[in-house]
Image (cartoon, rainbow, N blue to C red):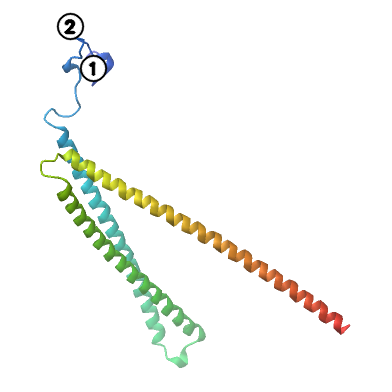
Amino acid sequence: MEKGRSTPKLYGSLDQTELCADTGKQAEEDVVSMADSTITVEDIEGELFRIERIKDALVRKESELRYMMDDIQLCKEITRLKKELQKLVSIPDKDKSNEDRQREEELLQQIQKLVETRDFLVDDMEFERLREREEDKEMADFLQTNIPNRCSMKSMCVLLWCCELKAKLLNLRFSALNAQINITIHFLSISVIVLLTACSSLMKMQTGEINKEYLLLEA
Protein backbone atom coordinates (compact mmCIF):
# COMPACT_ATOMS: atom_id res chain seq x y z
CA MET A 1 0.00 0.00 0.00
CA GLU A 2 2.74 2.43 1.00
CA LYS A 3 4.92 1.38 -1.95
CA GLY A 4 2.12 2.14 -4.39
CA ARG A 5 1.99 5.78 -3.42
CA SER A 6 3.81 8.18 -5.72
CA THR A 7 6.17 10.72 -4.24
CA PRO A 8 4.74 14.25 -4.63
CA LYS A 9 6.67 16.56 -6.90
CA LEU A 10 8.60 19.24 -5.01
CA TYR A 11 8.53 22.38 -7.10
CA GLY A 12 11.87 24.14 -7.01
CA SER A 13 13.02 22.26 -3.88
CA LEU A 14 16.73 22.41 -3.16
CA ASP A 15 17.06 18.68 -2.58
CA GLN A 16 15.44 18.02 -5.98
CA THR A 17 17.66 20.51 -7.83
CA GLU A 18 20.60 19.11 -9.74
CA LEU A 19 23.47 21.08 -11.20
CA CYS A 20 24.93 20.28 -14.57
CA ALA A 21 28.53 19.16 -14.19
CA ASP A 22 29.69 20.78 -17.40
CA THR A 23 28.19 24.24 -17.16
CA GLY A 24 27.36 24.52 -13.45
CA LYS A 25 23.93 25.85 -14.40
CA GLN A 26 20.66 24.54 -13.03
CA ALA A 27 18.82 22.22 -15.35
CA GLU A 28 15.67 23.87 -16.60
CA GLU A 29 13.56 20.74 -16.21
CA ASP A 30 14.27 20.63 -12.43
CA VAL A 31 12.14 23.76 -11.73
CA VAL A 32 8.45 23.28 -12.51
CA SER A 33 5.90 26.08 -12.15
CA MET A 34 2.54 25.42 -10.50
CA ALA A 35 0.82 27.39 -13.27
CA ASP A 36 -0.20 25.90 -16.59
CA SER A 37 2.49 26.25 -19.22
CA THR A 38 0.03 28.08 -21.49
CA ILE A 39 -0.69 30.81 -18.88
CA THR A 40 1.49 33.90 -19.01
CA VAL A 41 2.21 36.49 -16.34
CA GLU A 42 0.03 38.97 -18.22
CA ASP A 43 -2.87 36.49 -18.11
CA ILE A 44 -2.55 36.13 -14.33
CA GLU A 45 -2.31 39.89 -13.84
CA GLY A 46 -5.36 40.38 -16.05
CA GLU A 47 -7.32 37.86 -13.98
CA LEU A 48 -6.26 39.62 -10.76
CA PHE A 49 -7.38 42.92 -12.25
CA ARG A 50 -10.77 41.42 -13.11
CA ILE A 51 -11.13 39.99 -9.58
CA GLU A 52 -10.37 43.41 -8.07
CA ARG A 53 -13.12 44.97 -10.20
CA ILE A 54 -15.58 42.24 -9.15
CA LYS A 55 -14.66 42.76 -5.49
CA ASP A 56 -15.28 46.50 -5.77
CA ALA A 57 -18.66 45.85 -7.39
CA LEU A 58 -19.61 43.45 -4.57
CA VAL A 59 -18.61 45.97 -1.91
CA ARG A 60 -20.76 48.63 -3.58
CA LYS A 61 -23.68 46.21 -3.84
CA GLU A 62 -23.34 45.33 -0.15
CA SER A 63 -23.41 49.01 0.78
CA GLU A 64 -26.51 49.57 -1.36
CA LEU A 65 -28.30 46.59 0.23
CA ARG A 66 -27.51 47.88 3.71
CA TYR A 67 -28.99 51.26 2.79
CA MET A 68 -32.11 49.52 1.50
CA MET A 69 -32.42 47.41 4.65
CA ASP A 70 -32.17 50.48 6.89
CA ASP A 71 -34.74 52.27 4.74
CA ILE A 72 -37.18 49.35 5.02
CA GLN A 73 -36.81 49.25 8.80
CA LEU A 74 -37.42 52.99 9.06
CA CYS A 75 -40.51 52.78 6.85
CA LYS A 76 -41.92 49.94 8.95
CA GLU A 77 -41.36 51.87 12.18
CA ILE A 78 -42.91 55.05 10.75
CA THR A 79 -45.96 53.10 9.57
CA ARG A 80 -46.38 51.47 12.97
CA LEU A 81 -46.19 54.80 14.81
CA LYS A 82 -48.63 56.41 12.38
CA LYS A 83 -51.18 53.65 12.99
CA GLU A 84 -50.87 54.12 16.73
CA LEU A 85 -51.23 57.87 16.33
CA GLN A 86 -54.30 57.44 14.13
CA LYS A 87 -55.99 55.42 16.85
CA LEU A 88 -55.37 58.18 19.38
CA VAL A 89 -56.50 60.91 16.98
CA SER A 90 -59.77 59.06 16.35
CA ILE A 91 -60.65 59.36 20.06
CA PRO A 92 -62.87 62.42 20.75
CA ASP A 93 -61.13 65.20 22.66
CA LYS A 94 -63.56 64.99 25.56
CA ASP A 95 -62.74 61.30 26.02
CA LYS A 96 -58.96 61.72 25.84
CA SER A 97 -56.94 61.43 28.99
CA ASN A 98 -53.76 63.31 29.80
CA GLU A 99 -51.79 60.16 29.01
CA ASP A 100 -53.40 60.01 25.55
CA ARG A 101 -52.48 63.61 24.78
CA GLN A 102 -48.95 63.10 26.06
CA ARG A 103 -48.62 59.96 23.95
CA GLU A 104 -49.78 61.89 20.88
CA GLU A 105 -47.01 64.43 21.38
CA GLU A 106 -44.45 61.68 21.84
CA LEU A 107 -45.60 59.90 18.68
CA LEU A 108 -45.45 63.10 16.65
CA GLN A 109 -41.90 63.77 17.82
CA GLN A 110 -40.80 60.20 17.14
CA ILE A 111 -42.34 60.21 13.66
CA GLN A 112 -40.69 63.53 12.85
CA LYS A 113 -37.27 62.25 13.93
CA LEU A 114 -37.65 59.05 11.93
CA VAL A 115 -38.74 60.97 8.83
CA GLU A 116 -35.71 63.25 9.15
CA THR A 117 -33.47 60.20 9.58
CA ARG A 118 -34.94 58.57 6.47
CA ASP A 119 -34.52 61.76 4.44
CA PHE A 120 -30.88 61.88 5.48
CA LEU A 121 -30.47 58.20 4.58
CA VAL A 122 -31.96 58.71 1.10
CA ASP A 123 -29.77 61.76 0.49
CA ASP A 124 -26.69 59.87 1.67
CA MET A 125 -27.50 56.92 -0.60
CA GLU A 126 -27.95 59.22 -3.60
CA PHE A 127 -24.68 60.96 -2.76
CA GLU A 128 -22.88 57.58 -2.69
CA ARG A 129 -24.29 56.68 -6.10
CA LEU A 130 -23.13 59.95 -7.60
CA ARG A 131 -19.72 59.56 -5.97
CA GLU A 132 -19.30 56.02 -7.32
CA ARG A 133 -20.37 57.16 -10.79
CA GLU A 134 -17.85 60.00 -10.66
CA GLU A 135 -15.12 57.63 -9.44
CA ASP A 136 -15.81 55.25 -12.33
CA LYS A 137 -15.64 58.11 -14.82
CA GLU A 138 -12.40 59.44 -13.33
CA MET A 139 -10.84 55.96 -13.35
CA ALA A 140 -11.85 55.37 -16.98
CA ASP A 141 -10.45 58.76 -18.01
CA PHE A 142 -7.26 58.11 -16.03
CA LEU A 143 -6.67 54.71 -17.61
CA GLN A 144 -7.43 56.02 -21.10
CA THR A 145 -5.12 59.01 -20.68
CA ASN A 146 -2.18 57.44 -18.86
CA ILE A 147 -2.20 53.92 -20.28
CA PRO A 148 -1.74 53.55 -24.05
CA ASN A 149 -3.13 50.55 -25.90
CA ARG A 150 0.29 48.96 -26.24
CA CYS A 151 0.86 49.12 -22.49
CA SER A 152 0.87 45.75 -20.73
CA MET A 153 -1.71 44.66 -18.20
CA LYS A 154 1.05 44.65 -15.58
CA SER A 155 1.49 48.42 -15.89
CA MET A 156 -2.28 48.90 -15.68
CA CYS A 157 -2.47 46.87 -12.47
CA VAL A 158 0.47 48.75 -10.94
CA LEU A 159 -1.15 52.12 -11.65
CA LEU A 160 -4.49 50.89 -10.33
CA TRP A 161 -2.95 49.58 -7.13
CA CYS A 162 -1.14 52.91 -6.66
CA CYS A 163 -4.47 54.74 -6.93
CA GLU A 164 -6.09 52.37 -4.44
CA LEU A 165 -3.15 52.79 -2.05
CA LYS A 166 -3.48 56.57 -2.28
CA ALA A 167 -7.19 56.31 -1.52
CA LYS A 168 -6.50 54.10 1.50
CA LEU A 169 -3.93 56.60 2.80
CA LEU A 170 -6.46 59.41 2.43
CA ASN A 171 -9.02 57.36 4.36
CA LEU A 172 -6.47 56.74 7.12
CA ARG A 173 -5.72 60.45 7.35
CA PHE A 174 -9.42 61.23 7.49
CA SER A 175 -9.94 58.63 10.24
CA ALA A 176 -7.03 60.06 12.22
CA LEU A 177 -8.49 63.56 11.87
CA ASN A 178 -11.87 62.33 13.10
CA ALA A 179 -10.22 60.64 16.07
CA GLN A 180 -8.37 63.85 16.92
CA ILE A 181 -11.61 65.84 16.70
CA ASN A 182 -13.40 63.35 18.95
CA ILE A 183 -10.60 63.53 21.52
CA THR A 184 -10.74 67.33 21.47
CA ILE A 185 -14.51 67.29 21.95
CA HIS A 186 -14.12 64.82 24.80
CA PHE A 187 -11.61 67.02 26.61
CA LEU A 188 -13.77 70.09 26.02
CA SER A 189 -16.74 68.27 27.53
CA ILE A 190 -14.68 67.33 30.57
CA SER A 191 -13.51 70.93 30.93
CA VAL A 192 -17.09 72.20 30.75
CA ILE A 193 -18.20 69.68 33.37
CA VAL A 194 -15.34 70.66 35.68
CA LEU A 195 -16.12 74.35 35.17
CA LEU A 196 -19.82 73.84 35.92
CA THR A 197 -18.96 71.82 39.02
CA ALA A 198 -16.62 74.55 40.25
CA CYS A 199 -19.25 77.23 39.63
CA SER A 200 -21.85 75.18 41.48
CA SER A 201 -19.53 74.71 44.45
CA LEU A 202 -18.70 78.42 44.47
CA MET A 203 -22.38 79.35 44.41
CA LYS A 204 -23.06 76.98 47.30
CA MET A 205 -20.22 78.51 49.30
CA GLN A 206 -21.48 82.03 48.62
CA THR A 207 -25.03 81.00 49.55
CA GLY A 208 -23.76 79.51 52.80
CA GLU A 209 -21.84 82.68 53.66
CA ILE A 210 -24.92 84.82 52.94
CA ASN A 211 -27.03 82.61 55.19
CA LYS A 212 -24.47 82.91 57.97
CA GLU A 213 -24.40 86.71 57.67
CA TYR A 214 -28.21 86.78 57.69
CA LEU A 215 -28.32 84.67 60.85
CA LEU A 216 -25.74 86.91 62.52
CA LEU A 217 -27.79 89.99 61.66
CA GLU A 218 -30.91 88.41 63.12
CA ALA A 219 -29.03 87.50 66.28
Q: Nearer the viewer, residue 44 or 150?
A: 150
Local SS, label 1: loop
Pointer 1 residue: 7
Residue type at mark 2: give it.
Answer: Asp
On residue 107, which mark appears? none
Quarter-of-image position of residue 193: bottom right
Question: At 79% from the left edge and 78% from the top edge, which residue is drawn?
Answer: 211
Q: Position of residue 50 (x, y in %)?
A: 18, 44
Cβ–Cβ below 8 Å for labels 2 and 1?
A: no
Q: Is residue 179 above or below residue 38?
A: below
The structure residue drawn at horizontal position 16% and vertical position 40%, both measured from the top left corner, is 153
Q: Which x, y percent locates residue 101?
A: 47, 85
Residue at (26%, 47%) from the top-left corner? Answer: 163
- In the image, 196: left or right of 163? right
Q: Is residue 65 left or right of residue 145?
A: right
Query: Which residue is at a point 50% across and 82% down the rendered structure image?
Result: 99
Q: Quadrant of the N terminus?
A: top left
Quarter holding the C terminus is bottom right
Residue denoted by label 2: 22
Q: Position of residue 138 (x, y in %)?
A: 21, 55
**SS for tag 2?**
loop
Q: Of 89 and 138, which appears nearest the observer? A: 138
Give the CA separation, mark 2 to mark 1.
Answer: 29 Å
Left or right of residue 102: residue 60: left
Between disc 2 and disc 1, the foreground one is 2
The amino acid beneath tag 1 is Thr
Judge by depth and name the residue closer to the eye, 40 or 4. 40
Binning the other alpha carbons within 10 Å of mark 1 as few (below 14), some (14 to 19) or many (20 upward) gives few
Q: Nearer the viewer, residue 166 or 18?
A: 166
Earlier along the polypeptide chain: callout 2 or callout 1?
1
Left or right: 133 as drawn, with respect to 92? left
